[in-house]
Image (tube, rainbow, N blue to C red):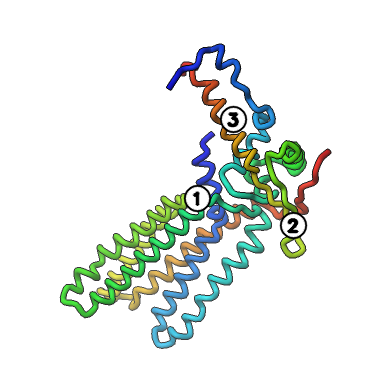
């Protein structure tokens, strides 16, 4: 019996639903569309509400009725909060560096593809490690690969003129993976008819 | 650390209420979280509804767990958590089990 592992697995129970992949995929699709249709990106940005609504409804109507609810230990909640704050701070620093780098003579160094690839890889693997979301290790390679392929196409335009199409393709791949996990989850945990605690005397 | 003699080890008391395999599964699961609902416990332990109900009743009677019934919308919901007593006794159970097997060769 490994209590630490059991706690980790319990905290990671939501990842078996595949909903996280679908949400990331949806966010990525909206981002890609905003890049492709740059002139109307203001209207497309409104679509960011779709993944948000999707995850709220999916957890309420798909995940919770099938696998129940859990309130994680306070230590885990604190750890997750700190983790999210750290990742957000890291992302903000990345954005600030990119903005500063645009008008700077060292722009190439600051905006270097390898630095951004490293940051993407670092964030993904950190998420995988701290949240026990093991598939995220694989997605780290997927995200870095998509970013580099997109940059390559941007620099050497060929048949595909916009690198954002690469993101669009990979976001569909992510959604398909999510759907496969979701189908497996639905099969494993069918909707229970009526589950309630009846005290036995 | 002082090693206990075999005689001392024989006196280690194992809490039978916790030691039963199905109840051990339930308590272990509750130990690593703050609280969980009935369905979550069923799913994580792989036990049937009747089984979980039966064991929870015994644990509730012994004040090892606290059970709160409520509703989410129209859906009934049962939230279960370990009491302070239950948590302490489970810690003691782990300690006793460790001590019991401490002297065994691999």
Residue A80 picture location, percent across and down? 47, 56
Residue furthest to the bottom in view is: A39
Which residue bears the numbered disc 2?
B70
Q: CA distance from mark 3 to mark 2?
A: 31 Å
Q: Secondary structure at mark 3?
A: helix
Residue B11 image point, x, y percent: 60, 17
- Residue A171, located in which quarter of the rendered image? bottom left
Q: Are marks 1 and 3 in contact (CB under 8 Å)?
A: no
Specify whether A114 is left or right of B67: left
**Among all residues in the image, which is located at the extreme right?**
A201
Quick check: do tags 1 and 3 share a chain?
no
- Give the class, few, some or many, for how many residues have Cα within 10 Å of label 3's Cα (few <14, many ≥20): some
Given the image, what chain letter belongs to the residue carrying mark 3? B
Residue labelled with disc 3 = B93
Pointer 1 indicates a residue of which chain?
A
Chain designation of label 2: B
- Looking at the image, residue A126 sits to the left or right of residue B54; the answer is left
Q: Are marks 1 and 2 in contact (CB under 8 Å)?
A: no
Q: Residues within 10 Å of mark 2 (few under 14, many from 20)?
A: few
- Crowding near the residue tagged with mark 1, few <14, some 14–19, many ≥20 C-alpha atoms within 10 Å: few
Left or right: A92 as drawn, with respect to A11: left
Which residue is tagged 1? A75
* A176 in relation to A72, above or below: below
Q: Element under label 2?
A: strand
Residue at 62%, 67% in the rendered image: A57
Mark 1 and mark 3: Cα distance apart in space = 22 Å
- Alpha carbon separation for disc pair 1 and 2: 26 Å
């Amino acid at each position: 019996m490994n209590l630490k592992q059991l706690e980790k697995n319990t905290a990671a129970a939501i990842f078996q639903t595949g909903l996280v992949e679908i949400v990331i995929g949806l966010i990525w699709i909206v981002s890609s569309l905003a890049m492709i249709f740059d002139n109307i990106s203001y209207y497309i940005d409104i679509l960011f509400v779709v993944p948000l609504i999707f995850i709220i409804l999916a957890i309420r109507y798909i995940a919770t009725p099938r696998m129940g609810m859990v309130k994680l230990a306070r230590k885990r909640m604190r750890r997750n909060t700190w983790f999210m704050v750290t990742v957000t701070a890291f992302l903000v620093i990345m954005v600030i560096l990119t903005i500063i780098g645009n008008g700077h003579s060292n722009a190439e160094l600051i905006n270097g593809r390898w630095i951004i690839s490293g940051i993407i890889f670092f964030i993904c693997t950190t998420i995988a490690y701290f949240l026990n979301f093991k598939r995220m290790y694989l997605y780290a390679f997927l995200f870095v690969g998509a970013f580099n392929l997109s940059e390559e196409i941007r620099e050497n335009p060929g048949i595909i003129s916009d690198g954002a199409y690469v993101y669009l393709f990979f976001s569909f791949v992510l959604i398909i993976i999510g759907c496969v996990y979701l189908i497996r989850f639905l099969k494993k945990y069918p909707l229970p008819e009526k589950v309630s605690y009846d005290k036995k005397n | 650390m002082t090693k206990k003699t075999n005689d001392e080890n024989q006196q280690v008391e194992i809490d039978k209420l916790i030691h039963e395999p199905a109840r051990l599964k339930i308590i272990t699961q509750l130990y690593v979280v703050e609280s969980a609902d009935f369905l979550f416990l069923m799913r994580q332990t792989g036990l049937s509804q009747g089984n979980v109900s039966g064991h929870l009743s015994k644990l509730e009677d012994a004040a090892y767990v606290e059970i709160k019934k409520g509703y989410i919308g129209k859906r009934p919901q049962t939230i279960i958590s370990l009491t302070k007593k239950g948590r302490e006794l489970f810690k003691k159970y782990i300690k006793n089990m460790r001590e019991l097997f401490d002297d065994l060769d691999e």
